[in-house]
Each structure stands twice: as C-alpha cells, then as structure tokens.
Image: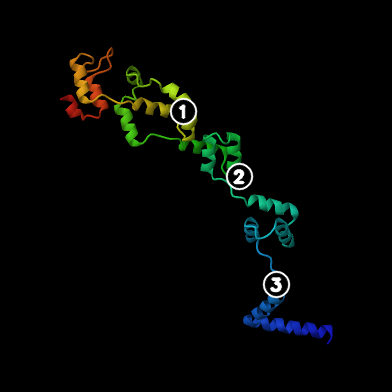
Amino acid sequence: MGLGSAMAIVGGAMGVSMMMPPFARNITYKMNEGNPNVIPDIALLIEARYRGEITPELFTTYLNQSGIGYGNVERLWNISENLLGIMELISLNRRGVIEMPLLLGEAEKLRWSADRVGKLLKITEAIPSTTDIIAFAVREVYSPEIAEAFGQYEGAEDVYDKAEADLKAVGMIKDTFTKYWAAHWMLPSVGQGFEMLHRGVIGMTATPDEPLSLERLMTALDIMPALNSS
C-alpha cells in the first residue's frame, strides 16, 4: 500500500469520525488507553506538589512539557502560596509582629492601596457601643472639666503606659481608652449620697466651686430625671 492510499484511508476514517462522534470518541479512548500522556492542568499539579504526590522535579518536568519555562515554573509556584488576609495583616501590625512597611507591602499583593489600608485601619479601631456612649454621658465623660474635678482621670496615664501594647492590639486609641477609664469608677449608692448630703460633704446641686453634688451623683447612677428632681 502506497503512502497515498494510507492517507486516503486515514482521511476516510477521519471523515467518518466527524460524521459519527461516538466512533470518533471510541478511537480517541483507544489511543489514550494505548498511550496515556495527558498532563494534568497547572492547578492540579500545584495541588499535587503541595500534598507531596509529586516531587518538585517532576512538577517542573510536567510544566516544561506543557510549554512553561523554568523561570515561570518558579513564579507559578511562588504565587500559588496562600497570603494572609488584610484583616490578619492589620492584626499582626497592631500586635507589633509586623511593621507598617511590611503591612503595606503585603496589602499591595492583595490589591489594597496604602490609602485604603489607612482608611481600613481607621474604621476598624475599637469604638464605644451605644450603651457605653450613654454611660459616658451620664458619668460626665463628655464634660472633661467636670470629670477632671471628680478625679475620674486619675491614674489613666500610668495605666495607659503599662497597657499600651494590649490596647494597640485591640485597636483602641488613647482617647477612647481615657473615656472608658473615666467611666469605670464605682459610684456611691443613692443612700450613701444622702448620707454625704446630711453630713455636709456634698451639696444638693453643683456649683462652680463645688462640682460634686447629690444631683450629679443621681444622674451618674442613671436615676430618672423625674425621680432625681423630686
């Protein structure tokens, strides 16, 4: 049989296979079974290497056979590694594990710009809850001059200096910590307040010279205004 005849037979078989897909698949299956040489896709090869199913050398060979050069093999392997998420990076930075330049460098790999990282740092700071804000208000935290007169800031600086690393780790700035500190003190009971009033330790209402008063104590204790005034 000449070359022309052989090619005619092959061409005829191909023509039949195109008109009869099952016949074509059968030929493909038989050829694959006789000479199995399909290389898994890159994602599967990377997974196989991570799991120890193939050696780094075989990994490189397969990718070379797929047309990927040695330099790109290394690049593909490097970029397959999982990266820490942006919130994990921020937590590491706040805990002092990584510095800001490294945070920004790793964030860039996640497509976070320095400006957006800065905004994210700001919005993830610890902030008071609604209940805390109300407590701050009734305990005069939003009236610094009164809180100062009551001695509510006493010890705040020393404690902040000692606890700065922990506060930074949870994303709490100094101003917020100071508010919590000023509001944390235990208060005398209403009965104790009346006892102090009767003994002349405090007055009924506050004055510029005497900010402490029974009225302000009852406000700080969250006594309703109607009961307070009575």
Mark 1 is surrounded, within 10 Å at the Cα level, by few (under 14), some (14 to 19) or many (20 or more) other residues, namely: few
Element type at mark 3: loop
Image quadrant where one finds the N terminus: bottom right
Q: Position of residue 148 (x, y in %)?
A: 35, 18
Query: Counting other residues with Cα less than 10 Å from the Cα at mark 2, is it few (<14), some (14-19), or many (20 or more)?
Result: few
Tell me residue 40's x, y (percent): 66, 64
Which residue position holds label 2?
109
Which quadrant of the view contains residue 126? top left
Looking at the rendered structure, the secondary structure element under dot 2 is: helix
Q: Amino acid at mark 2?
A: Lys
Residue 204 in view in this figure: no
Lower position in the chain sequence, tag 1 or tag 2: 2
Residue 145 in the image: above or below residue 120: above
Secondary element type, mark 1:
helix
Q: How many marks?
A: 3
Q: Residue at x 33, y 17 (%)?
A: 149
Is label 3 in contact with label 2 (beta carbons under 8 Å)?
Answer: no
Disc 1 target residue: 163
Horizontal side of 48 relative to 127 (left or right) equals right
Q: What whole-number distance in Å separates the C-alpha atoms at marks 3 and 1?
A: 65 Å
Q: Earlier in the sequence, mark 3 or mark 2?
A: 3
* Residue in view at x 68 percent, y 76 percent: 33
Residue 36 — which label? 3
In the depicted view, which residue is nearer to us: 176 or 167? 167
Q: Residue furthest top?
A: 209
Crowd around label 3: few <14 · some 14–19 · many ≥20 (10 Å): few
Provide residue 154's location: percent of width, then percent of height.
38, 20
What's the amino acid at mark 3?
Answer: Pro
Q: Give, as a three-letter code, the residue at label 1.
A: Ala
